[in-house]
Amino acid sequence: MKKILNIISLLSISLLIIGNVQAQQWTIDDELKDAKIKVAYDEINIDAGKAIYDVSCKFCHKDIVAAPTNDRELPTAPNLGSQEFNKNNTDGEIFCKISYGNGVGMPGYEASISEEDRWKVVAYLRSYCESYEPPTTDDNAPVVMEKFEGKITKITATFDKEKNTISTKIEGVDSVGNKVIPNNVKMKISVKRYFGDMTICDGDKTDDNGVVSVSLDGIIADTSGYIIINAAPIDGSISIEESIKLNDGWQWVNPLDQRALWGDNAHTPLWLLISYLSVTFGVLGVIGWAAFQLFRIWMLRER
């Protein structure tokens, strides 16, 4: 009997594993397998795709970073900016994976995101692929996105106290190694907080001097007057983290140390004082009664 139960258990586990593997299979439409992106591969659609990604995908996949291979482990979903992912999937395959999911970790968005918007997400993911060749228009002219062709080598951050702005400047080299000033590069700047970074710049482009400036109005520093800035190009290829002294800091002031209408017993209304004392003594009474009952139970147990 025990042998039969072991065989049944083994079969059940095997079926469960097989079912789980089958559930994780991607559904790829034959007519879409080799399809090219069906929206213009331009900055407008890429920005729109990023907005959709931030709402629907970022919670699991986090920020996209350009990397040779997936650099994340479970339970974090894969980094969709890896060159490996982009090279191993056609536009149509990525579209189908977004549309239908895999039945387990990845949900399908066919019902919640329009077809056009799903293609815009594909455009956004493709913007991280260095070797991606955009589709051609009807007149056979390629639709290209203007971007910096080279490598960013350095980022610096400076604070202008008079204007209350933070400016980041990037430096780089072109494809043959000559020093250049990268312009038209989208930047992301955030301020570190205890419960996650607060983004203050997301997609602003560097000017002809390679600079992006952002206002710090409304940003609160720590007690010493410092904030920690994180700056990186939108593809995450390089980043810096720098401490900036914003002001002279601040100190917490206990309001009870200041003069107030009800700051002492002499200025407290009688009804408020009676209410406070009644609640306080009532709570203490309940605690005392509960302790007494526990003591009685202990005495009865001893007897």
Image (cartoon, rainbow, N blue to C red):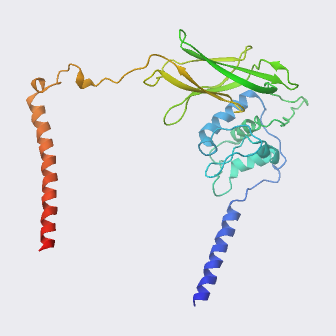
Give the answer, above or below, for where 39 lies relative to 10. Answer: above
Residue 115 lies in quadrant? top right
Q: Nearer the viewer, residue 53 or 64?
A: 64
Residue under the point 44% across and 16% down:
248
Residue under the point 61% across and 88% down:
3
For residue 100, side relative to residue 191 (left or right): right
Q: Quadrant of the N terminus?
A: bottom right
Q: Which percent across, then down, holds residue 297?
A: 15, 67
Residue under the point 82% across and 54% down:
30
Q: Quadrant of the C terminus?
A: bottom left
Q: Which percent across, then down, holds residue 199?
A: 57, 28
Q: Report how many numbered discs are placed on residues in the image.
A: 0
Residue under the point 16% across and 62% down:
294
Give the answer, above or below, for where 53 lies relative to 212. Answer: below
The residue positioned farthest toward the bottom in the image shown: 1
Q: Nearer the viewer, residue 212 or 59?
A: 212
The residue positioned farthest toward the top in the image shown: 162
Residue 42 lies in quadrant? top right
For residue 235, side relative to residue 54 (left or right): right
Residue 183 lies in quadrant? top right
Q: Which percent across, then down, holds residue 68?
A: 77, 42
Q: Nearer the viewer, residue 146 or 33?
A: 146
For residue 300, side relative to residue 136 (left or right): left
Q: Which percent across, then down, holds residue 168?
A: 65, 19
For residue 134, side relative to residue 112 (left or right): right
Give the answer, above or below, for where 139 lies relative to 38. Answer: above
Q: Nearer the viewer, residue 188 or 117?
A: 188
Give the answer, above or below, for where 128 lies relative to 145. Answer: below
